[in-house]
Image (tube, rainbow, N blue to C red):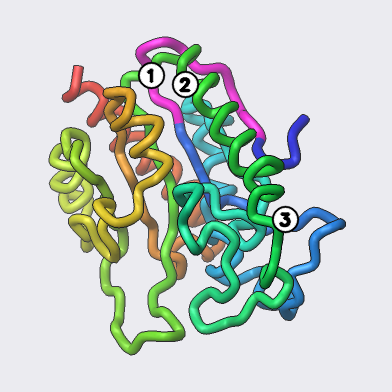
Amino acid sequence: MSEVYRQLGTPAPGGIVLVADHASNAVPADITLGIPERLMHEHIALDIGTEAIADLLAQEHAIPAHIAAVSRLVCDLNREEEAPGLVPEASDGHPIPGNIGADREARLNRFHRPYHTALANWLATAQPALILSLHSFTPRLATSDAARPWEVGVLYNADDRAARIAIPLLAAEGLNVGDNLPYSGRDLNYTMNRHAEGEGRAYLGIELRQDLVATPGSDARWAALLARIAQRVASALA
C-alpha cells in the first residue's frame, strides 16, 4: 500500500495501460498547504474527473491503471525534479503558503521518486503496446481571459504516432479536438517523456475539459469512448 499511487488491474504484454498523474486531491495529515478547503476541489489541486474514469477503464474495460494518490499541490508528479512548479508556491493566481520554504528534496524522496520508480517497474513488467495518459483541464484559467473551447486535447512531444491516429478518430465522434492544445506536450510532458518516449513506447496523451467530466454519468461515457479510441489506436499501431 502506497500513499503516492495505487494500481488497478493486471497488465498483459502487448495490451493497453493507463497512467493518471493528477487523479487525487489527497494531502497527507502531516502536510499543511494553508489554502481554503474549496480550492482542494478545483483544478489547481487535481485533474477533475480523471480518477473516476481511470477506475472505470481498469474495472470495466480491461485497461489496467497506475493512478496518483496525492495532490499535485503536494508534489506535481508530472514535472521534472528541478521544475519550479514541482512544489508550487502558487497556482493559477492562488498562493500556496504551506509550500513556501518546503523541503523539496523531502517531497521528491517521499512522493515523486517512489511514484516514478513504481511506474517504471510496472511498465517494464507490463510491456504495453500503448500507454494512455489521462489528464483534464479547466475551461478557463482564473489568470487568463482566453477561453478553451476544445472538448478534448491530444498532447505529444516528439512521438506523435498515436496522436496522428487518435485526432481524426476523436473528431469523427463530433468532438472539438485540440492538437497539442490547450497546451503543448512539447512544453509539459514529463511522465510520458520519461516512461514512454524515453523507452520507445507509444502513448496517447489525452486532456478532457473538466466541465464535460463533472456531470452525472459522464465518467462512464468518457471511459467507454476512450477505451474504444485507445483500442483502435493500438490496433493501428500494431
Magenta residues, as a range?
6-17
Q: Residues within 10 Å of mark 1 (few under 14, many from 20)?
A: many
Name which residue type carries label 1. Pro
- Upstream in sequence: badge 1 or badge 2: 2
Name which residue type carries label 3. Ala
45 sits left or right of 153 in the view? right
Could you tell me residue 208's position as x and y percent? 39, 57
Label 2 sits on a secondary structure element that is: helix
Check whether the beta carbons of the residues at disc 3 and disc 2 lie within 8 A of each other.
Answer: no
Q: Residues within 10 Å of mark 3 (few under 14, many from 20)?
A: some
| Residue that carries the numbered disc 2 in the rendered image | 123
Could you tell me residue 158's position as x and y percent? 19, 41
Label 1 sits on a secondary structure element that is: loop
Tell me if residue 95 is in the magenta stretch. Answer: no
| Residue that carries the numbered disc 3 in the rendered image | 26
At a point 29% along the width and 84% down the height, the residue shown is 146
Q: Residues within 10 Å of mark 2 (few under 14, many from 20)?
A: some
Could you tell me residue 47's position as x and y percent? 52, 59
Q: Quadrant of the N terminus?
A: top right
| Residue that carries the numbered disc 1 in the rendered image | 128
At a point 35% along the width and 13% down the height, the residue shown is 14
Nearer the observer, 215 or 168: 168
Q: CA distance from mark 1 to mark 2?
A: 7 Å
- Upstream in sequence: badge 3 or badge 2: 3
Residue 43 in sight? yes
Tell me if residue 11 is in the magenta stretch. Answer: yes
Could you tell me residue 203's position as x and y percent? 31, 33
Q: CA distance from mark 3 to mark 1?
A: 28 Å
Check whether the beta carbons of the residues at disc 3 and disc 1 lie within 8 A of each other.
Answer: no
Name which residue type carries label 2. Leu
